[in-house]
Image: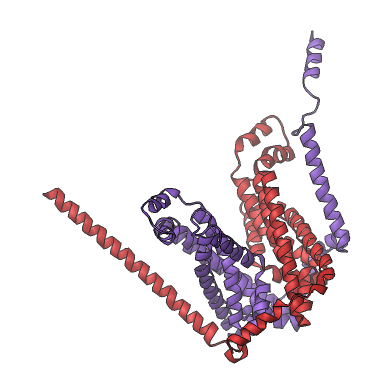
Chain colours: A purple, B red
Amino acid sequence: MTEHAGRIQRSQAPKTWSRYRFPESLWRFGAVLAIIVFLGYSMAFMNVDIGLLFGALGGLLGVIGTRFYPPDIAYVLDAGYLASILDTLQMSFLGGMAGVALAIPLAWFSAWNVSPHRRVLFPLGRLGVISARAIHETIWTILFVSVLGFGMLAGVSALTMFCIGFAGKLFSDEIEAVDMGPVEAMRATGANSLQVFLFAVVPQVRVAFTGIAIYTWDVAFRAATVVGFFGGGGMGWYLKRNVQQLENLRVGAIILSIIAMVLVAEFISGWLRAAVNRAK
Amino acid sequence: MSATDTHIAGLGAQTTLRRKRQMKQALIWTGVLVFAAWCAHGTIIADTDWSRVGGRSGVLASIGRYMQLDLGLLPELVRPTIETFMMASVGTVLGCFFSLPVAWLGAANVTPSKTILYPVGRFLMVLSRSVHEIVWALIFVSAVGLGALPGILAIAMRSVGFISKITAEAIENIDAKPVEAIRATGGNQFQVMYYGILPQIYPVVLATIIFEWDINIRRSAVMGLVGAGGLGLLFFRQMNSFNYGGVSMVILAILMLIILGEIISHYLRKAVI
């Protein structure tokens, strides 16, 4: 009797349970294997010693500790350096504002649902946002420095391009998600596309845009800390000078000050965004 | 009569409220514009040597230098392009490995110690995100020397913050019932994680990793500017030898690579979700 019941159980269910059945499990295994093979090949291609990689992790803390510690805090309290922090703040604010101002029309063009001209302006807007996004802010800085010369003008221009790419994508995503009811109502009364944008789209996205603009400033500040490294002015310029002079203790202090300033900026932007959401 | 009165009073209150709000907005806008004007004065007017910029013709001439593409550079572009792509991929995977413990520490419901290790995890997330990738690369170049390795490490460190933050949030939002069910059937800690938590978070986490990989291609293209390998190094060399046509070629290669990355990540995301 018991033997009989046991036999039935064995024949009905497989002995071990696994989450994925045969064809799916094979696909998953193949995908993981392909990724591992690709990673291994990459390591060989780039001449990266895996032993060094894992050895580096252990030794890294030691190296950083002996090289950058103790940071030269007195250096970052110097008046010249504090003025450069103010420069960085100014650059990020101006770049963020110009970027947001330019990103709004581009986002309007590149939002498929309310784009004023789907055949010409839509691809132009998309291209503008994508190319501003595709090129890293440091490369923008180098390019602007080579055209406009060293200084904060190049930094502000580079940050503007960066913010167009960053905010433009978020803005156009936001516009594409609006409620189409008001848009259709405006269109039915014969409004042109600018009127539709101003009176049907903007009231819906105003609060979200404000939040995104504040966030853009936050991210721009993070980028502004390094544009100076490539000649754009601000804190990065001090970083570059001290890196090249191998003043590692000063570099450590500068990096610490960058982290502190970015944390402050993040805190301010979080507080402002919460305030905007409350005032909604 | 009285109803009309209260109605009118209500209207009056509404108008004052509205006027107050308009005043407040006008104040905020004035403040923002004054601040912007001050910034513009400090950065653009006081800090720029306009004679060096050289007017409109000077700027146009400087831009024109970039327009003559140096097609002879094409064969030299192949290897750095592949290297950039690989650096981004390896860096992302390494970043995922680093994110695992950080997410574990920084998720409020699974953290081993809420008073000590939870803040540590949160701090590591913020630290990773607040240091720019160029600064990470500088640190690692000084620690492990030139080559692709510092670039990989810098990208990994920079990715940790975002991946582990999203992962920790996903862990915090899981449904506790499957976890309890597996515990009730006698599953050990590993089985609880593998069968109870992982299936719930992995679509979100995979989508995040793909997103981060896409961004990391952008980042790995500039690692060479501070001594790690890839397209950035070629860019730097072309720029330093004033071969502006070559610079444009490198930028075009970066654009191609990023468009490729965007296409791949689009299809991967579709396959995952």
Q: How many marks?
A: 0
Choose top left, top right, bottom left or bottom right for residue B27: bottom left
Residue sitting farthest toward the left: B1
Residue at image location 72% in from the left, 53% down from the top? B264
Quadrant in the picture for the N terminus of chain A: top right
In the picture shown, does residue B224 fall above or below A206?
below
Q: Position of residue A157 (x, y in %)?
A: 59, 76
Q: Residue at x 38, y 57 (%)?
A: A191
Along the line of sight, the residue nearer the viewer: A102 or A124: A124
Side of B77 relative to B13 (left or right): right
Q: Is residue B61 visible?
A: yes
- Extreme residue in the top direction: A1
Q: Is residue B219 depicted above or below A158 in this figure?
A: above
Residue A91, percent across and down?
56, 77
Which image quarter is the C terminus of chain A in?
bottom left
Residue B119 in which image quadrant? bottom right
The residue lying toward the viewer, choosing from B9 and B186, is B9
Q: Position of residue A40 (x, y in %)?
A: 86, 54
**Could you tell me residue A255's position as x and y percent?**
67, 73
Specify whether residue A231 is in view.
no
